[in-house]
Image (cartoon, grey):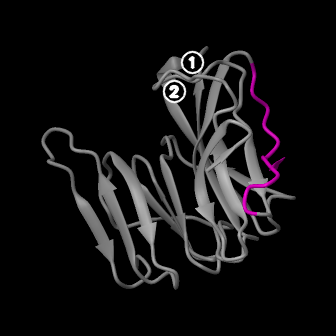
């Protein structure tokens, strides 16, 4: 989606609303975002004609590199989920931390969680927004719009992408190939149980 020269990637809801991540003229290195800078999350309720910022309030210091990694939206456009990663430049031994934020009112109010010490790469959402799937060092699931999270039965790895069916019962996760694994694919036909 392009609007006023800005490129966004995301998901279009049945009502034409679009959630997406926009590179607002800031070019980020592939592995380390600029310290103290957070790329905004934009929301459109009119198929991209106009956009407004609907991001969680973050405290990003000059010693923290943070970026959003993924966004998902329910069919009606009211339920949103975003994942982000944070790197503490003063304590690099901590590595990347993963954040997940959810909203049930099109981004007006957000609930967030710092989940484990994994960089969350991807989020997927069922059609009604109740079932969520996230990928990072592990694959996590939620059946209550992100109020609580559970580790899936998939082993730890370099999980990079997830998908979920509209009704939330079918799930898939893919892993980046790394030694000794050629890249695994995990599937579930029963909501990840």
Numbered disc 2: secondary structure: helix
Residue 126 in the image: state x and y as whole percent: 56, 76
Q: Which residue does the numbered mark 2 point to in the structure image?
A: 94
Magenta stretch encompasses residue 86 = no
Neighbour class for label 1 at 10 Å: few (<14), some, many (≥20)? Answer: few
Could you tell whether 140 is left or right of 171 in the image? right
Could you tell whether 99 is left or right of 96 in the image? right
- Residue numbers of the magenta segment: 47-61
**Residue in view at x 75 percent, y 28 percent:** 60
Viewer can see residue 121: yes
**Residue in view at x 20 percent, y 50 percent:** 183
Total labels drawn = 2
**Residue in view at x 46 percent, y 25 percent:** 31
In the rendered view, tell whether residue 93 sits above or below residue 59: above
Q: Which residue does the numbered mark 1 point to in the structure image?
A: 91
Q: Which sits in the foreground, 191 or 9?
A: 9
Magenta stretch encompasses residue 60 = yes
**Residue in view at x 35 percent, y 51 percent:** 159
Circles 2 and 1, Cβ within 8 Å, touching? The answer is yes
Residue 9 in the image: state x and y as whole percent: 57, 49
């Amino acid at each position: 989606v392009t609007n006023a020269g800005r490129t966004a990637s995301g998901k279009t809801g049945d009502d034409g609303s679009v959630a997406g991540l926009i590179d607002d003229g800031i070019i980020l290195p592939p592995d380390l975002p600029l310290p103290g800078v957070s790329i905004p999350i934009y929301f459109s309720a009119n198929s991209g004609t106009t956009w407004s910022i609907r991001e969680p309030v973050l405290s990003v210091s000059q010693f923290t590199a943070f970026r959003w990694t993924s966004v998902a939206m329910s069919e009606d456009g009211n339920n949103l989920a975003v994942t982000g990663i944070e790197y503490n430049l003063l304590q690099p031994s901590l590595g990347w931390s993963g954040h997940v934020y959810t909203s049930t009112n099109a981004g007006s109010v957000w609930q967030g969680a710092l989940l484990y010490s994994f960089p969350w790469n991807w989020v997927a959402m069922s059609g009604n927004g109740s079932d969520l799937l996230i990928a990072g060092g592990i694959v996590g699931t939620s059946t209550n719009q992100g109020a609580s999270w559970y580790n899936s039965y998939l082993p730890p790895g370099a999980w990079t992408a997830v998908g979920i069916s509209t009704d939330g019962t079918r799930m898939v996760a893919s892993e980046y190939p790394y030694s000794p694994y050629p890249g695994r694919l995990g599937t579930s036909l029963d909501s990840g149980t």
